[in-house]
Amino acid sequence: MYDRLLVSTDGSGSANAALELAGRIASPSATIHVLVVSEDDGDDGPRDVSDRTVDEILDDARETVTADVKAVVTEHRRGDPREQILEYIEAADVEIVVMGAHGRRVAEPIVLGRVTEGLVRDAPVPVLVARASDDIRGLYPFERILVPTDGSEHARAALELGVALAAETGATLHLLSVVGTTRYGLGSESMALLNQLEENATRELEAAAESAADGTGIDVRTTVNRGSIHRTISAYAEANDVDLLIMGTHGRSEGDRELPGSVTERVLRTAPAPVVTVRARETNKS
């Protein structure tokens, strides 16, 4: 699937889950880049909870994924982790970054950490976030992929990736549009507006499904729900045993408004499966 993958690791259980998932989604001819970034100036670099050195962490990581891919490249850098990872993405022409995050699959929200949050906002390539409690061995090939969409440019980028992955793996592609209700009251005018928004979302979703299925033969299913956007997305993923969520992000969060960027970050903390975040390609405007 992917030929050039990057996993940033600190030797933790969530980072090991990211490594394992990277091996699953990599093509046999792929190169997996494994990077440790330390912010201190010590000679030996940081040690993990098992008191392993950086070299030991990288050796263990190499052993984890060597059987899955053609090559494994390991590197230790010093500096700001977010900046170092972004620089590495450009230098190695990475296609996707796979990151680990803390938190259990059930009941406990995921803890992203500032590095993962920064990459979700700023990385020029998709970022796949997995946690240690995810059933990595049973995830690939994916059987059910969910793409929440609001018709935005970034949501269309997520849909494009979802179609490609569903076509490659034979997965059922679920398209979900959520009509947010948190800003509206219960009066007749509000209900009429919500009904109109739902009708518009249904038409847009049906058009997206028709485009996704055209020429691919993939099974596309559409749903329009009402409710809190991020909670509805996570609940749908849970109820339908989704293996992977793909979400567009603007690469920024604006207060508490339910814009795609902030919704994506909220879903990342509550989703019952790994989440890929993707941004639309930037175009130069004159």
Image: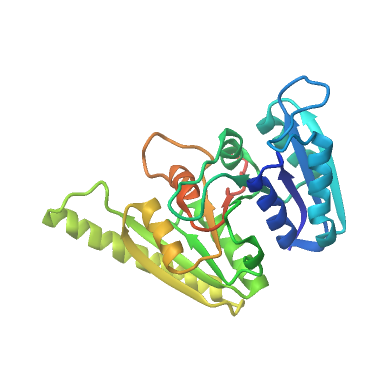
Res 189 quadrant in image: bottom left
- Residue 40: name its quadrant: top right
Left or right, residue 70 beside residue 42: right
Residue at left offset 68%, top offset 26%? 80
User: Is 59 situated left or right of 162 in this image?
Assistant: right
Q: Residue at x 46, y 55 (%)?
A: 106
Residue lying farthest to the right in this orientation: 71
Horizontal side of 130 relative to 206 (left or right) equals right
Question: In the rendered view, how is the structure colored?
Answer: rainbow
Quarter of the image containing the C terminus?
top right
Measured as percent of width and height from the top left, residue 153 is found at 51, 52
Residue 107: percent from the left, percent from the top? 43, 52
Residue 198 lies, with reference to residue 97, above or below; the image says below
Residue 87 can be seen, yes or no:
no
Observer able to see residue 95: yes
In the image, residue 134 lies at what x, y percent? Answer: 58, 57
